[in-house]
Amino acid sequence: MIDFEMIQTAINNMISGAIDYTPRLLTTLLILLLGWVLGRIISTVVKKLADRLHLQSLFERTGVQAGLERAQIKRSGSQLLGMLLFWIVFLNFILLGLENLGLTAAVEPLRNLIAFLPRLLAALATLVAGVLLAQFLGRAAQAAMSGMGVDFHEEVGQGVNILLIIMIVIVVLEQLGINADILTTVFTNILTIVVGGLALAFGLGGRGVAQNALAGYYAREQFGAGDLLIVDGEEGTLEGIGTLNAEIRMGDELLIVPNTKLTETAVRIKDTERAEDF
């Protein structure tokens, strides 16, 4: 026979539990609504502030926006920044709601996710700032090499830029909690090999190259294009001083001499205003 009394008791218990649970459920819904509204407000404010600060142009200059487009992400970097902040705020309120409902099994994973999002935001800021710094230092190195008359100044600037970006990527990975020891070791070994190889090359066979490159820097301070020079009894017009050699026009002929010739021998400038010996 059916025990109607047991069924009635079970139904009463369910109804009683639902009634007891309803205030907590309503409180949780209110918490979620408040979190959603607050998150939207913060997201909107951040996006407007990003527009005023022209952060989108920084994302474009550092290649972040191009990376997003290659990943088929249609949103701009500023929009993603606002979205990230929205979820940081909203997930904290979701965590409060779960704790209010007593759903402890879902609390710890969500807490770990919330702890990761600020690190992601900090890593993004580090990446953008680091790439901008790498670009600035790369251009500075390129300008310095160009001022010294080094023909491969663009390659030097690009090399400095790439090395710094690799270092920044390692820092960003460590910020995200990703073990970058292998990448750090590989990068250090490659850098050591390259620097050691260059030092060995200059030590064994590149001493003359280094002397001419340095002489070119000082020669450009003493002589200018168009100067009429007398070098070892030969007279000609200086056309330019390169990384290793200087070009002197002698009628129909072009004389190419090492830069050390201009700094280590007597050179006369035939000029009514600045006739002097070096």
Image (cartoon, rainbow, N blue to C red):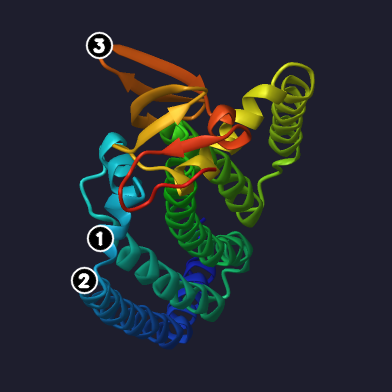
Q: Give percent across and percent down for residue 49.
A: 26, 78
- SS at mark 2? helix
The location of residue 69, given as percent across then percent down, is 25, 40
First in sequence, mark 1 or 2: give its number: 2
In which quarter of the view is residue 48 placed?
bottom left
Mark sitting earlier along the chain (1/3):
1
Q: Crowdedness of circle 1 by 10 Å Cα count: few (<14), some, many (20+)?
A: some
Label 3 is placed on what type of residue? Asp
Q: Which label is found at residue 51?
A: 2
Identify which residue is drawn at 76% across, 31% down.
192
Q: Residue 252, which numbered label?
A: 3
Provide residue 46's location: percent of width, then percent of height. Answer: 30, 76
Percent of width and height locating residue 96: 51, 79
Sequence order check, earlier mark of 2 and 3: 2
Do the residues under discs 1 and 2 have CB atoms within 8 angstroms? yes
- Residue 138 in view here: no
Query: Between residues 56 and 154, which one lies in front from this camera angle?
Result: 154
At a point 33% along the width and 40% down the height, the residue shown is 67
In the image, 44 versus 11, the foreground residue is: 44
The quarter in which the C terminus is drawn is: top right
| Viewer-nearest residue: 202 or 73 | 202
Q: Which amino acid does label 2 sit on?
A: Asp
Q: In this view, does 135 lie to the left or right of 167?
A: left
Disc 1 residue type (three-letter): Gln
